[in-house]
Amino acid sequence: MTVPVKPYPAYKDSGVPWLGEVPAHWTQLPGRACYREKKVPNRGMQETTVLSLSYGQIVIKPVEKLHGLVPASFETYQLIDPDDIVVRPTDLQNDWNSLRFGLARHRGIITSAYMCLNTQEPVTHEYGHLLLHAYDLKKVFYGLGSGLRQNLDWRDFRYLPCLVPPPDEQRAIVCYLDHADRRIRRYIRAKQKLIALLNEQKQAIIHQAVTRGLNPDVQLKPSGVEWLGDVPEGWEVFQLRRVTVARCDGPFGSGLKSTHYTESGIRVIRLQNIGHAEFKDGDRAFISPEHYASLGDHDVLAGDLLIAGLGDERIPPGRACVAPEGIGSAMVKADCFRFRPNSSWVSSSFLAFHLTATAVPAAAVLSTGATRQRVNLQSTASRPVAFPSLTEQILIVEALRKVLEPLQVAQARLEREIALLREYRARLVADVVTGKLDVREVARGLPEELEEAEPPDEDQALLEGEEAEACEVGAVIEEADV
């Protein structure tokens, strides 16, 4: 996306290294002159609409998602009004990916572990949110924070250097970035739809191969499992526990949290690493060897079968992949399972394909929950799998890899294009809000657009939603301890 913008005609030194030079006519004020903290508890249950921070947007949390450790009464939550800025202030030292600021569009309540800010004149609420969002993208807040968990509080905002353009220029910046963001999101959604179509094609190919084999004329027989249906003659059907020699799940509760993560050490395999028969290596987390030694047997070796125990209507539980060569010292986290196949009987890769292809019907029988489906280690171990001889399994896997390779290349290209669009969007926001680009003239010529809700990017919202839910559950525990 080419944008005809240019720098401002005159600049001055901000005196802040990470801001550098700023437009000469802009004002620079401390955070206390631009924001104030708001704390209004939901006493008397004034509101019951629960809000959530998901990939930088404040969304209404569906009633069916209010599961797990939530308080019996939401009186401990805080009231949020439209135009309030919600801040997730926790876990600075470990979580460098989440977007921590959201602008509320609805009245509702949110966990009191979050902060709530109002803007003050001369800052508009839209620009005030964009300013904090730009600083967040520049990772300004990761050098702040206090306490054992490195959390933000109001002290970190009181003297924060804030750039304040004239009011009409604030409106121009908001207008321009809203216009650009809408178009970038549309490009991203278009590419995500193409990825979804590729995934559907891949899943159809995989399902045919691992439930019918390579011979289209093969005779079928009942599997004895209603949701598995008929399988080729000569194939065997056993519970997963019968064709594996060891299994485990990750530690639950306080044993392993994001606050335990380190920059290196023992690799932690999480839900986002388990794709559709593909190991997703990009999102890495580690814990120290010392902490790992305190957790028991959750280790992972190359060739192990990794199975997701949590999913939803788009990404079902029960999908699987194989731990790759060179993974090093690794372990599974909660809601992830490690099975070690009997290599003289079954191929790990075939099982990963088979479990992924049959994950949806299996989840309908084995899982609990509505929007967040969950299966446990025991039900996964008892899950029926159908398979031919080891020789035929290897032939099926080799055939699948040849057919899937061009589809995977196309998907990787689309994912890279989405990543570049996100990088461009982040850089554009930071450059415009900190005065590196002058958008006043361009904003005047932009067409007016009808108001439309822009949903979060689907894949990012999933990951962010998991992190936000974990944070909110943790907040409830903290509130109960007070």
Image (tube, grey):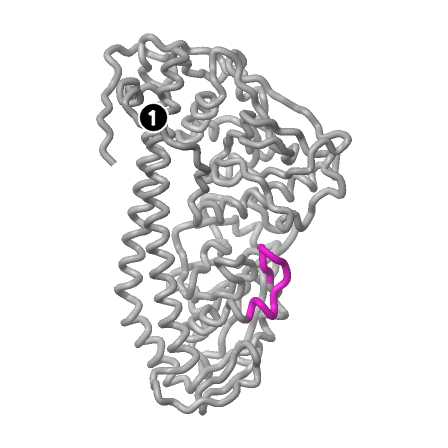
Q: Three-letter amino acid code at disc 1?
A: Tyr
Q: Is residue 475 magenta?
A: no
Badge 1 is on which residue?
Answer: 176
Q: For the C terminus, which image quadrant? A: top right
- Is residue 371 depicted above or below 161 in this figure? below
Q: At x 57% / y 85%, what residue is drawn? A: 224
Identify which residue is drawn at 72% across, 37% down. Answer: 74
**Dot 1 lies on which element?**
helix
Q: Nearer the viewer, residue 280 or 120?
A: 120
- Identify the residue at horizontal 50%, vertical 68% (top origin): 359
Whether residue 4 is situated above or below residue 258 in the rendered picture = above
Q: Quadrant of the N terminus?
A: top left
Q: Position of residue 39 (x, y in %)?
A: 66, 24
Which of the pair 145/353 is nearer the observer?
353
Q: Does 364 appear in magenta?
A: yes
Q: What stretch of residues is rendered in magenta? A: 362-374
Mark 1 Cα shell of 10 Å, populated few (<14), some (14-19), many (≥20) = many
Q: Can you give x and y, in whole percent of width and height, for residue 109 in the image? A: 65, 34
- Tell me the quarter of the picture where residue 388 sits: bottom left
In this rendering, position of residue 95 left or right of residue 422: right
Q: Nearer the viewer, residue 426 or 262?
A: 426
Relative image position of residue 265 (x, y in whole percent): 47, 50
Report if residue 91 is visible in the image. yes
Vertical placement of residue 191 versus 236, above or below? above
Picture quadrant of residue 22 = top left
The percent position of residue 292, horizontal first and vertical second, equals 56, 54
Kindly identify the residue that appears in the image at 31 percent across and 76 percent down: 398
User: In this rendering, is residue 428 above or below 419?
Assistant: above
